Amino acid sequence: MWRVVYMARTKAMADHINKLLVREGFLIKLKPVYRNVPEEENYYEILAPKTEAQEVHNILMENGF
């Protein structure tokens, strides 16, 4: 089961967070919030497995997110 650990305002921010977390060894999914909105204007959910959500949140906090 996947849990939302962060909401990114842009695709660029979502990609940056994704790279950070993957580099730390986490399995991450990005999911756009809206279907009919251009990529650059959409919000993105950053999802992690439920069992890793707390660790992912800690890494995000350590990195200023």
Image (cartoon, rainbow, N blue to C red):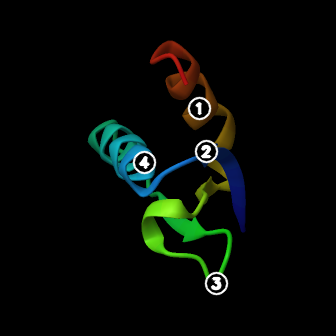
The answer to whether one can see residue 42 in this image is yes
Residue at 45 percent across and 50 percent down: it is 14
Q: CA distance from mark 3 to mark 2?
A: 27 Å
**Please, is residue 41 above or below residue 6 in the view?**
below
Contact, mark 4 vs mark 1 (Cβ under 8 Å): yes
Circle 4: residue type: Phe
Contact, mark 2 vs mark 4 (Cβ under 8 Å): yes
Q: Residues within 10 Å of mark 1 (few under 14, many from 20)?
A: few
Circle 1: residue type: Glu
Residue at 57 percent across and 64 percent down: it is 42
Q: CA distance from mark 4 to mark 3?
A: 26 Å
Q: Mark 1 or mark 4, which is nearer the start of the sequence?
A: 4
Q: Which mark is residue 35?
A: 3
User: Which residue was labeled with disc 2?
Assistant: 52
Secondary structure state at the residue bearing disc 1: helix
Secondary structure state at the residue bearing disc 3: loop
Q: Residues within 10 Å of mark 4 (few under 14, many from 20)?
A: some
Q: Position of residue 9 (x, y in %)?
A: 57, 47
Contact, mark 2 vs mark 1 (Cβ under 8 Å): yes
Look at discs 4 and 3 and give the one toward the viewer: 3
